[in-house]
Image (cartoon, grey):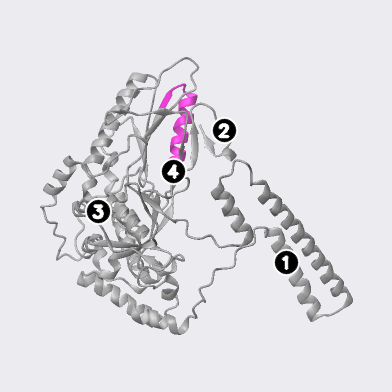
Amino acid sequence: TKTIIDAANDSIPRSKGKNRKQNKPWWNNECQQAQKRLRKAWGKFRRYPTTVNLIAFKRSRADFRRIERYSKRTSWKRFVSSITSSISSRELWHKVKKAFGTPISNPISALCVNGQTISSLKGIANTIASTLANTSNSKNYNREFLNHKMKTEKRKLNFNSRSDYSYNCNFTFQEFQACLSNVHKSSPGPDNISYIMLLHLTTESQTNLLYLFNRIWNEQCFPSSWQEAIIIPIPKPGKDITNPLNYRPIALTSCLCKLLEKMINRRLTHFLETKNLLSPFQSGFRKGRSTLDNILALETDIRLAFLQRKHLVAIYFDIEKAYDRTWRYGILKDLFDSNLRGNLPIFIENFLRLRRFRVRLASEMSDYFIQEEGVPQGSILSVTLFILKINNVLNQLPLSVKGYLYVDDLCIFYTGMNMNCIQRQLQTAINNISQRSADNGFTISASKTAAVHFCRKRNLHLDPELKLNGVSIPFLKEIRFFGRCFRQQTLLSPSRNAIT
């Protein structure tokens, strides 16, 4: 780490740390094209200073100035028109500061916890960090699952093996290059090493880095600095920013670790896919699959139900704090039951152990806090491990009930003519999903779970009575599913982003 940072300091000039120049809100594609024509005319006149080229340059300059003035006026009119009597004072001052070019300061000025106001940056950072740590605490599990957890974890999982499996062999330079070439621009983690530094390493240095990765892989150790993360809290839109629960954590982890995770994740996903260990109804972060698969499947069944004059009842579930409360031992047990042995599962076991983080606000850092359960935010392996853990939630559904998953977004639906049959089948499916979720440490939010009854029959028909953990599931006239709006009876055009 020190060698890479020293090399970067010697070869890459540092910026002055000043605020970046703000983009001009009036600048658009038309201005850009006019400026391009102006520069082209100027370059031609500078090389060939003839009268014709001078006239062409002046014409291009006048044209650019005209477009610039028109764009500024239009942008200013649009900006002023957005300031209405219904705008909040916060948004108003935000627009005023933007108009004057004043950089927007950190929006977290104070937090209110148990009637007390916390205004110091250190106090705010520690409060948010403490809230995030409490979210992943095992005390959030219910008593029944905690007893099951304590009993199950007494059994030690032995991943050691003498067999030479292909997924445990050393990483090749081709694997290293393939993963490094696919990285995106990302902020560095606690070690301050970014992907750009790794991309500009010489072939010899990259070979040495691969040697280090293979040593970590074969010696089955895990650097303690890779178990740390820096959390940047982002306020949830439309929420009270004085409540520490209303912040979304953005985790910055080591880019070195994430690069090794990429290589391991490729081997893990290949193993899971070739062994058909993932549910065919899970579309999240899998090659050749997307949210479009789930949207089209639901849309097709809705349209078919309309044509056949049938009822289709869909239920949309919400899993509380799914990532933060994923049972880690349960993930390792699923890997063990999948017959994974050797370096790969041992790396994941070390990867999940003793995760800690700090929250950063401006230049202030919080104390270290422990993430007891859950998959680490911002890590490459986390999504695959979560998908593996939630994989069996859709097991034991009635054959006539269809279900689809996109990571933690779950939807089930049933089509039929008889409302009593629909109610019976869906209630059985709800009970099975609730039980399977509870067995794996997941909690389905009864308050956020909703249903929609799709039907075009004109005669009066009541919605089925469905319950989740004794709480009635509310029926809505429309619901948003993967960014698309599904309505109860009418079809809207795709341009309005709605399906019914």
Kindly identify which residue carries mark 3: 373
Say if mark 4 contacts mark 2, CB within 8 Å.
no
- Which three-letter amino acid code belongs to the residue tagged 2? Leu
Q: Residues within 10 Å of mark 1 (few under 14, many from 20)?
A: some
Q: Earlier in the sequence, mark 4 or mark 3?
A: 4
Q: Viewer-proximal residue, 177 or 151?
A: 151
Q: Residues within 10 Å of mark 4 (few under 14, many from 20)?
A: some
In which quadrant of the rendered view does residue 60 lie?
Answer: bottom right
Which one is in front in this view, the residue at disc 4 or the one at disc 3? 3
Q: Measuring 39% from the left and 72% from the top, which residue is drawn there?
A: 192
Q: Earlier in the sequence, mark 4 or mark 2?
A: 4
Q: Secondary structure at mark 4?
A: helix
Name the dominant secondary structure of the magenta segment: helix
Number of numbered callouts drawn: 4
Kindly identify which residue carries mark 2: 492
Q: Secondary structure at mark 2?
A: loop
Query: Left or right: where does residue 436 sit relative to residue 51?
Result: left
- Which three-letter amino acid code belongs to the residue tagged 4? Asp
Q: Earlier in the sequence, mark 3 or mark 1?
A: 1
Q: Measuring 53% from the left and 72% from the top, which residue is drawn there?
A: 18
Kindly identify which residue carries mark 1: 35
Q: Measuring 59% from the left and 50% from the top, which residue is drawn there?
A: 92
Query: x, y percentage for residue 322?
Result: 31, 47
Position above or below: 116 against 52:
above
Q: Magenta stretch?
A: 294-312
Which one is in front in this view, the residue at disc 2 or the one at disc 3? 3
Residue 302 included in the magenta stretch of the image:
yes
Q: Marks 2/1: CA distance?
A: 41 Å
In which quadrant of the rendered view does residue 22 lie?
Answer: bottom right
Kindly identify which residue carries mark 4: 293
- Which three-letter amino acid code belongs to the residue tagged 3? Glu
